[in-house]
Image (tube, helix red, strand yellow):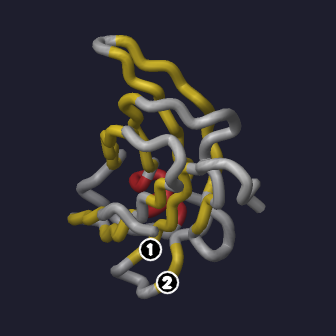
Amino acid sequence: MPNTNRPTISTHVLDTTRGEPAAGVAVTLWRLDGKERTSLGTRETDADGRIGDVLAQALEAGSYRLSFEVGAYYKKKGLTTFLDRVTLDFHVTDISRKYHIPLLMSPFACSSYRGS
C-alpha cells in the first residue's frame, strides 16, 4: 500500500486482448539525467495489474522512464507478441502531485495517459 502522505508514481496495466488486468508484468522505474539513467527499482504488477508506488524514495523533479516487460508477460500466456518492452518517458515538474501512468496493452499495440 502506498504511503499517502507523499507523492508517488503508480501504474495500472490492462491486457486489452484478454479484457483483464495484467498480473505479473515486471516494471522498472529509471531516473533519466541527460544520457545517464539510473534504475530506481523493479516491481511486478499485482493480481489487479497494479503497482501502488513504483518509487521507493522521495519524488524529485526531473525525467523518468517506466519500462514494462510486456513480451515476457505474453510469452507466459503462450501468445506471440510484436512488442517486447514498452518504455514511457515522462517529466515530473510538480513534486507535490501523485503521478499515475497506466498502460493499456495488447501483443501488437499499446496506449498510455496521465491518470489521477
Measured from the top left, where is residue 51 in percent x and y? 62, 59
Q: Earlier in the sequence, mark 2 or mark 1?
A: 1
Q: Outermost residue toward the top?
A: 35
Q: Which sits in the foreground, 114 or 21? A: 114
Secondary structure of the residue carrying tag 1 is: strand
Q: Is residue 21 left or right of residue 36?
A: right
- Asked if residue 50 lies left or right of residue 15, the reply is right
Which is more toward the observer, 95 or 33? Answer: 95
Q: Give the residue number, with chain letter if any, for mark 2.
A: 20
Q: Are marks 2 and 1 in contact (CB under 8 Å)?
A: yes
Disc count in the image? 2
Please say if 33 is above or below 58.
above
**In the rendered view, would you say 51 is above or below 21?**
above
Residue at 39% over, 29% down: 62
Query: Which residue is most to the bottom?
Result: 19
Residue occupying image coordinates x 52% and y 31%: 60
Q: Tag 1: residue type?
A: Leu
Q: Which residue is mark 1?
A: 14
- Mark linked to residue 50: none
Q: At 37% across and 17% down in the image, what residue appears?
A: 33
Residue at 30 percent of width and 12 percent of height: 35
Q: Is residue 60 above or below residue 51?
A: above
